[in-house]
Amino acid sequence: MPVYADDLVTVGYAQVGHESDWRTANTQNYQDVFSEDAGYSLDLVDCDNDNAAQLEAVRTFISKDMDYIVIAPIQSAGWDTVLQEAQDAGIPVIIADREIEASDDLYDAWVGTNTTNEGITAGNWLAEYLGDADANILVIEGSVGASATLGRTDGFNQVAGEHDNWKILDSQSGDFTQAGGQEVMESFLKSYDDIDVVVAENDNMAFGAIDAIKAAGKTCGPDGDIIIFSFDAVKAAFDAMIAGDLNAALECNPLHGPRVDEIIKK
Ligand code: GZL
Ligand code: ZN
């Protein structure tokens, strides 16, 4: 018995892009959960970390009159107009993963992580790890304007503010990519010679930073000159910790599909 498209619940997912292992796992999870067998027709658009492309993807979902629209917003700002258009079209919107700066009557639900709390957890881990040692700290931030960047930076800075012997020398965006992390770390290594700690706001940027640190003839990890830790805790981060290159990884769960499925079913 053939299944016709109109039997399926159509879901449009405007995905951030493919910038990290975390993002890859998140995409795979949606493809696993929103399968035809489960009664869904998923239209997942990889917006390639491009804000304009993401707005366009959402407008296309509206023109296709999807049953549901899910957005993982690349940036927090700039969503009011298109969310109003979706609402006028009578299409429920679920914001997933990252947060937006829009009144919450413009979307129906949100699924994601508390990145400020992740930043605080990271700061507290570092405080315990350092004891009362001084620390010159460099931060490799995530994509500019992303709530994950804003939250992790804010949370970590809250804890850093409690330690007057911690000095944040610099903080630059590596755009959540491995290449970005390597480039930022290379520039940091040229500018600063006494680096004690590197905070990477996701694992892939940490992997790039580790390559840069080694290329500069320095060492990192539990037995190295430089403490480096990151966020996500993807599989490759565990490999890096086992290899002795990475001190720690703060977990952030990418498997949002089941929660979004539950909300849609409600
Ligand atoms: C966090 C997520 C972040 C990941 C990065 O919830 O938005 O985006 O930490 C990804 O790996 O790029
Ligand atoms: Zn030092």
Image (tube, helix red, strand yellow):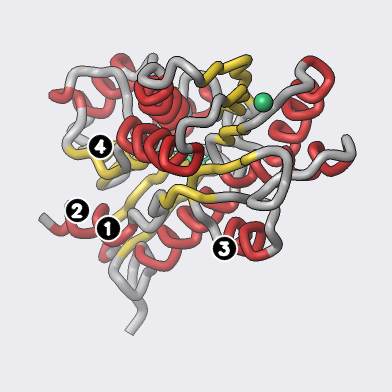
Give the mark, 4 or 2, whose residue is nearer the N terminus: 4
Q: Quadrant of residue 105?
A: top left
Mark 3–mark 1 CB contact (< 8 Å) = no
Disc 4 crowd, CA 10 A, few/some/many (<14, 14-19, 20+): many
Q: What kind of residue is marked 1?
A: Val
Instruction: Name the residue located 33 percent from the left edge and 68 percent from the top edge.
Output: 4
- Which residue is label 2 attached to? 264
Q: CA distance from mark 4 to mark 3?
A: 31 Å
Front position in the image: 210 or 166: 166
Q: Secondary structure at mark 1?
A: strand
Q: Is mark 3 within 8 Å of ligand 1?
A: no
Mark 1–mark 2 CB contact (< 8 Å) = yes
- Relative to 69, residue 145 above or below: above
Q: What kind of residue is marked 4?
A: Val
Residue 250, percent from left and from top = 45, 48
- Which residue is label 4 attached to? 93
Q: CA distance from mark 1 to mark 4?
A: 14 Å
Q: Quadrant of residue 199?
A: top right
**Is 55 displayed left or right of 116 in the figure?**
right
Give the mark, 3 or 1, whose residue is nearer the N terminus: 1
- Nearer the viewer's eye, disc 3 or disc 1? 3
- Relative to 84, residue 264 above or below: below
- Which residue is label 1 attached to? 9
Instruction: Name the residue located 63 percent from the left edge and 40 percent from the top edge.
Output: 227
Q: What kind of residue is marked 3?
A: Lys
- Which residue is label 3 attached to? 235
- Quarter of the image containing the N terminus? bottom left
Mark 4–mark 3 CB contact (< 8 Å) = no
Give the mark, 1 or 4, whose residue is nearer the N terminus: 1
